[in-house]
Amino acid sequence: MDQIELMKELHVPSGKKIILLVMDGLGGLPGKNGKTELEAARTPNMDTLSRSSMMGLSTPVAPGITPGSGPGHLALFGYDAIKYQIGRGVLEALGIGLELGPESLAARGNFCSLDPASGEITDRRAGRIPTEECARLVEILRQITIDGVNITVQPVKDYRFVLVLKGEGLHDGLTETDPQKTGLKPLPVKPLRKEAEKSALVLNEWLDKAFELLKNERPANGCTLRGIATNPNLPTFKEVYGLNACAIATYPMYKGIARLVGMDVPDAGDTIESEIKTLREKWNDYDFFFFHVKKTDSYGEDGNFDAKVEVIEETDRIIPDILELGPGVLVITGDHSTPWALKSHSWHELPVLLHADNIRTDPVTEFGETACIMGSLGHIRHTDIMPLAMAYAARLTKFGA
Ligand code: ZN
């Protein structure tokens, strides 16, 4: 019996609500003054909260493993991210609100520029064409038809689009067509297993037709497909935890991850203020809220220490609004680290704050990576967080007699 099965057996109803506040890419590394982004940020509300919380450090997926946001969040939601792997195409499709049935294949598409003579890629992102141009090209690609296959193409942002194919016998296990560098031609889709042979034929037919339709366009006269995958049909939050769950997020991909585990995803605008407003509006309708803050990660990726600090400070200012609602459990952490110094995701542990009744406090009086080393949660894994939140929300019954 794994943890998901155990949670399915042990969960019981309770009136206590859980909030999981995720600052994307929260974990950092020391800057000029020897403090990390979180430590340098003025966070009076989180610091005060730390005095009545259990603190610790959490490893997202496994020691030394740098996760994407998909596995980072799945682990936070209590799912073994190595067991439940999700294709990028699926995340993108769900993120823009497309429904994926059991026989749907989703791929993330990138428009690219090809040398008209050789067919080799000259720019993998077609000069980062604007979203409006992407939408116009997608409209052209919508002319493509294939017998027995229902095709959906949707623009995402800049040069990115999503392709979803629905039809009998479409399975995943397929290679990507982006050769990952310029000077090479886009690759054909190849099946990695027998069941995926039909999918490869269909996708290559779609690609042939797409290249024909795009050939006179500039700069985007080609496209590549990545992360071709089917919906993994994960057990839902309702099944696993008995929770009616709501996701409050502003970016498509995080909404998509939440939908994968059966969370409702209301429109939450695109600022932290509109997110907190949504939380207030939905408070009475759900038991669990995943509250996502994106910009900490974006500025970490930019290597912008000060801007990441500002987003953390902005998030700190909504803590009183959250506490006013009276959550039974409030967890604050991140999905993975995105240290300014690395300008990318990393494997570093994340600081965790768990605020609830009936806790053992610890000597930690501020929310920061170094301070959390002394916390009573110690070193945990992201998959430990949901069971702890469930226990402190009085939502788990005794295991065994
Ligand atoms: Zn992330």
Image: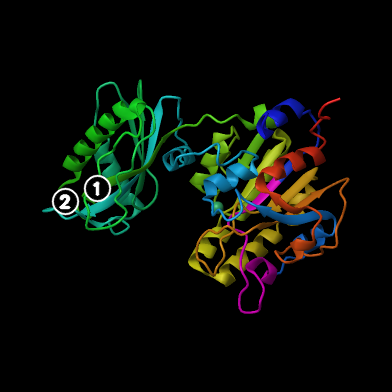
Is the C-beta of the residue carrying label 2 under 8 Å from the nearest atom of ligand 1? no
Element at badge 2? loop
The amino acid marked with disc number 2 is Gly
Q: Residue 395: which quarter of the image? A: top right
Q: Residue at x 55, y 59 (%)?
A: 346
Where's the N terminus, which quadrant? top right
- Residue 190: percent from left, percent from top: 29, 36
Q: Residue at x 61, y 68 (%)?
A: 29
205 relative position to 394: left or right: left
358, above or below 103, in the image: below
Magenta: main secondary structure: loop
180 relative position to 360: left or right: left
* Res 244 label: none
Magenta-colored span:
20-41
Residue linked to disc 2: 119
- Give the CA distance from mark 2 to mark 1: 8 Å
91 relative position to 61: left or right: left
Q: Residue 387: which quarter of the image? A: top right
Where's the C terminus, which quadrant? top right
- Residue 18: percent from left, percent from top: 74, 41
Asked whether 301 or 324 is in front, the reply is: 301
- Of callouts 2 and 1, the N-terminal one: 2
What crowding class fits label 2: few (fewer than 14 Cα within 10 Å), some (14-19), or many (20 or more)? some
Residue linked to disc 1: 186
The amino acid marked with disc number 1 is Pro
- Residue 91: percent from left, percent from top: 47, 41
Asked whether 42 or 38 is in front, the reply is: 38
